[in-house]
Image (spheres, rainbow, N blue to C red):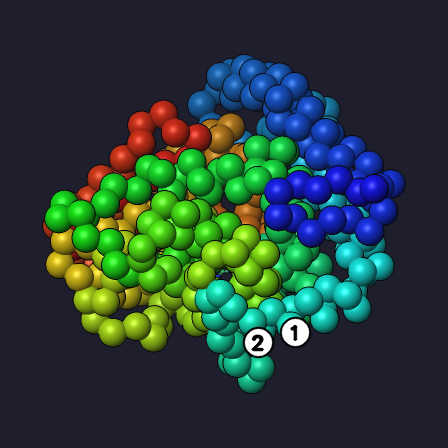
Amino acid sequence: MPEQWGTTPQAAEREDDSYLYFAEGLRSFTQKQVAPVMTRIAEAVLAEAPPTSLDDVKRRLDPLPIVASRNRLMRSTQEMKWVGINETYRKREAELLAALDAADRAGPGSVRYDPNFDYPAYFRESRFHLQPGGYWTDPLAGFFYHYGTKVFFTGRNNDDDLQRELVALIPTPADGEVRRVLDLGCSAGQSATALKERFPQAEVWGIDISAPMVRYAHYRAITMGLEVHFAQMKAEELEFPDASMDIVWAFILFHEVPVEIGQQIVREAYRVLRPGGVFALADFPNRPPEQAATVAGYVRDFDTNHNGERFGSAFVYSDFVGAMRRAGFSSVNPDAAPGNWIPVRVCVK
Ligand SMILES: C[S@@+](CC[C@H](N)C(=O)[O-])C[C@H]1O[C@@H](n2cnc3c(N)ncnc32)[C@H](O)[C@@H]1O
């Protein structure tokens, strides 16, 4: 029998799991064993003369064998993962599509999407994390993405663990009222279901620009018996009234949109929150642009150019805290969970 990883749909065959487990293990080895050695050597090389620019860093680091090996391993484990996931779920394609169709009409919760949705160019032209077809062209994209995150997070997210841990860090509004909660860029819906588990009395919404994602998220929430509402929507054009939400949450959305769209999303989060409402998000750390010419800047640039994170660097070097303040948030904490593996920002309206 194939393994059952939390709510991740099973692979078609056990040998498909083995292949994917190998890709995951190789990725873990790369991160834990290869990357620290690479960083040590790369920092020693850059210490010989202060780098003048990111291009200068690339010119000096690209030829180093340990750097090239680490880069190849990071890229190839991503590519292997998508080959394996595509192969295994294709074998179950008819069954999985039928499950999505049935879930469209079932509860608890609901899903809404538009077969004629006009996807913006910045999204259409992106192939995040090298996922074949991107987030939206393949009706099975949500299934793919979910298994993909299991491999990407190297076993740390086999049962929504990451989302549950992050959602636990969201402070509630000072008056304790949590009636409506919104998850922006919900993908497979793992944060949205974690939000429903944490706030069972609240009406929880997950929105995503991708139809296959909201369909899969709804299907998955049903399998968990959780009443969550999903809708296809742009986070920068929310279809919710002013002051209708108590909490808005976003996990790793902002680095996947152009900076100006991210600023629009922050303004929309402000608009839909009621006074005293909380906007919390977890995403890449922001850094001053001068830090691009470092080993960390080199690694960020690799991710941007070789892992389909085309807006990642622009987000990192942007003034995101300024954007939150300019949107009107009175209290902005850019590091509400010090020491956490990913910074959690919290703002209050
Ligand atoms: C990395 S995933 C987010 C993971 C998810 N938040 C979680 O808790 O696991 C990014 C998601 O953002 C969605 N997205 C990208 N641009 C968007 C936009 N402008 N509005 C809404 N969703 C968007 C993508 O379709 C994708 O599903």
Mark whose residue sits in front, 2 or 1: 2
Q: Amino acid at mark 2?
A: Arg
Disc assigned to residue 315: none
Q: Is residue 68 left or right of residue 156?
A: right
Q: Nearer the viewer, residue 85 or 192?
A: 192
Residue 17 in the image, given as x and y percentages of width and height: 79, 41
Whether residue 111 can be seen here: yes
Q: Is residue 21 left or right of residue 160?
A: right
Above/below status of 119 relative to 193: below
Whether residue 258 can be seen here: no
Q: Is residue 300 left or right of residue 245?
A: right
Quadrant where the N terminus is found in the figure: top right
The quadrant in which residue 234 appears is bottom left
Q: Amino acid at mark 1?
A: Asp
Residue 96 in the image, given as x and y percentages of width and height: 73, 64
Residue 333 in the image, given as x and y percentages of width and height: 22, 39
Circle 1 sits on which residue? 101
Instruction: Measure the C-alpha gap from mark 2 to mark 1.
Output: 7 Å
Q: Residue at x 54, y 64 (%)?
A: 218
Residue 184 in the image, given as x and y percentages of width and height: 40, 59
Q: Are marks 2 and 1 in contact (CB under 8 Å)?
A: yes
Circle 2 sits on which residue? 105
